[in-house]
């Protein structure tokens, strides 16, 4: 029985040495892989933080975009109303220009056309209160 224990210890020692030898043989590769794993973990953490920040910025940008689109709709309505007023003002300016043209040219028949109105005003001013 003691031979079995000695044999088991010897075989265990050989297996341990073999594992140690294999691990020691690829020590550089294992260390390189561990450093790559650490670098990858740091990069993943950095990218996760960046992703969280971008998600928050994206939510804020969506909110601001929605607000700006609503304001744009309001401004479009205002511009449409102003366009209507501009058309009316343009027509009024044309009519004013036409009226100014007529007022600047003397009309010889104006006294005859105005005579009934002048007579009416003259009659009203001649009336007395008592």
Image: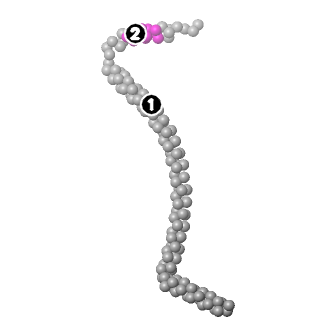
**Which residue is label 2 attached to?**
115
In this picture, is 111 found above or below 31? Answer: above
Question: Which structural element holds mark 2?
Answer: helix
Query: Residue 83: x, y in percent?
Result: 43, 33
Query: Does label 1 or label 2 sit earlier along the sequence?
Result: 1
Query: Residue 29: x, y in percent?
Result: 48, 80
Of labels 1 and 2, the one closer to you: 1
Q: How far apart are the two marked residues, 1 and 2, measured between alpha carbons?
A: 39 Å
- In this picture the colour scheme is one colour
Name the mark on residue 85: 1
Place residue 117 in its image quadrant: top left
Give the residue displayed 55% in from the left and 60% down from the top: 52
Which sits in the foreground, 95 or 35?
Answer: 35
Q: Is residue 121 magenta?
A: yes
Which sits in the foreground, 2 or 64?
Answer: 2
Q: Can residue 88 be seen in this view?
A: yes
Q: Is residue 73 magenta?
A: no
**Stretch in magenta:** 113-122
Q: In which quarter of the image is the C terminus?
A: top right
Question: Which structural element holds mark 1?
Answer: helix
Query: Residue 1: x, y in percent?
Result: 68, 90
């Amino acid at each position: 029985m003691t031979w079995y224990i000695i044999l088991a210890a010897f075989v265990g020692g050989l297996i341990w040495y073999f594992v140690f030898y294999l691990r020691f043989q690829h020590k550089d590769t294992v260390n390189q892989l561990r450093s790559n794993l650490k670098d990858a973990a740091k990069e993943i953490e950095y990218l996760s933080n960046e992703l969280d920040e971008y998600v928050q910025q994206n939510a804020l940008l969506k909110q601001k975009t929605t607000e700006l689109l609503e304001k744009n709709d309001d401004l479009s309505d205002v511009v449409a109303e102003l366009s209507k007023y501009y058309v009316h003002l343009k027509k009024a300016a044309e009519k004013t220009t036409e009226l100014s043209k007529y007022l600047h040219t003397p009309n010889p028949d104006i006294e005859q056309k105005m005579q009934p109105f002048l007579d009416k005003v003259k009659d009203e001013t001649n009336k007395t209160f008592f």
